[in-house]
């Protein structure tokens, strides 16, 4: 039953986040479980300095290394939707690209210049924060031919955000 899996996975993520694991182990284990409820084709997860939001350590799965400079340039130098710095201060710390562009992802330079050319469609981004302190960021990707992220998937990730922040903090 899908609801039972969601509840059990949410409990497992909370347990991991409060188990005192090192940052890398926490991210590996929490993301492995998250993927059982929110399927993804690729991901980026980084710890950040809460004062500057600069990345201090990252994990990348299934994203070509050749696009790293373009992602960094977009994130830190250009205007776009769902930027990590915006999510760190927004009312809600999680948002998908498709939702932010009202299903017109071509409005996003990141989509046009980076995501679509490498075969990615929707992305679900999160600032892993508790209160005003952001301890990490997460970006989940789906292939261009796949479905966008659902509101239920975004809500599931949003419920996990404060626990992940505690685990990383």
Image (cartoon, grey):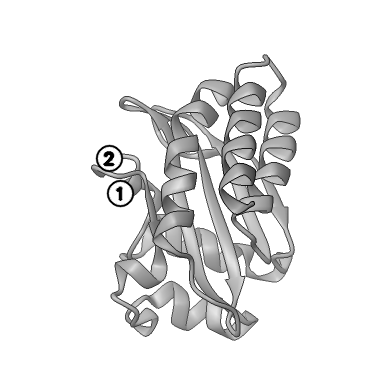
Can you identify the residue that label 1 sits on? 86
Choose top left, top right, bottom left or bottom right for residue 102: bottom left
User: Which element type, helix, strand or loop, lies under badge 2?
Assistant: loop
Query: In percent of the image, x 69 and y 43: which residue is there?
Result: 33
Choose top left, top right, bottom left or bottom right for residue 77: bottom left
Label 1 crowd (10 A; few <14 / some 14-19 / many >=20): some
Picture coordinates of residue 6 (x, y %)? Answer: 58, 44
In the depicted structure, whether residue 29 falls above or below residue 15? below
Asked if residue 99 lies left or right of residue 53, the reply is: left
In the depicted structure, whether residue 131 falls above or below residue 89? above
Numbered disc total = 2
Q: Residue furthest front?
A: 1
Asked if residue 66 lies left or right of residue 81, the reply is: right
Query: In percent of the image, x 33 and y 82: which residue is there?
Result: 104
Label 2 crowd (10 A; few <14 / some 14-19 / many >=20): some
In the depicted structure, whether residue 114 falls above or below residue 145? above
Instruction: For the residues labelled 2 and 1, say whether their Cβ atoms are less than 8 Å apart.
Output: yes
Picture coordinates of residue 19 (x, y %)? Answer: 67, 16
Viewer-closest of 37 and 29 = 37
Asked if residue 26 lies left or right of residue 71, the reply is: right
Picture coordinates of residue 121 (x, y %)? Answer: 53, 77
Query: In percent of the image, x 61 and y 43: which residue is there?
Result: 4
Mark carried by residue 22: none
Asked if residue 158 lies left or right of residue 120, the reply is: left
Query: In percent of the image, x 27 and y 40: which residue is there?
Result: 89
Picture coordinates of residue 127 (x, y %)? Answer: 43, 42
Choose top left, top right, bottom left or bottom right for residue 9: top right
Can you identify the residue that label 2 sits on? 89
User: Which element type, helix, strand or loop, lies under badge 1?
Assistant: helix
């Amino acid at each position: 039953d899908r609801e039972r899996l969601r509840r059990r996975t949410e409990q497992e993520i909370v347990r991991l986040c409060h188990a005192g694991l090192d940052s890398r182990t926490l991210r590996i284990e929490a993301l492995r479980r998250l993927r059982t409820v929110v399927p993804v084709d690729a991901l980026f997860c980084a710890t950040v300095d809460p004062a500057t939001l600069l990345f201090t350590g990252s994990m990348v799965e299934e994203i070509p290394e050749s696009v790293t400079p373009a992602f960094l340039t977009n994130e830190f130098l250009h205007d776009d939707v769902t930027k990590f710095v915006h999510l760190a201060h927004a009312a809600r710390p999680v948002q998908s690209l498709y939702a932010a562009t009202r299903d017109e992802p071509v409005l996003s330079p990141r989509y046009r210049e980076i995501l679509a050319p490498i075969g990615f469609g929707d992305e679900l981004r999160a600032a892993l924060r508790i209160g005003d302190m952001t301890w990490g960021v997460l970006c989940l990707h789906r292939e261009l031919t796949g479905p966008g992220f659902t509101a239920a998937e975004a809500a599931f990730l949003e419920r996990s955000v404060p626990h992940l922040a505690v685990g990383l903090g």
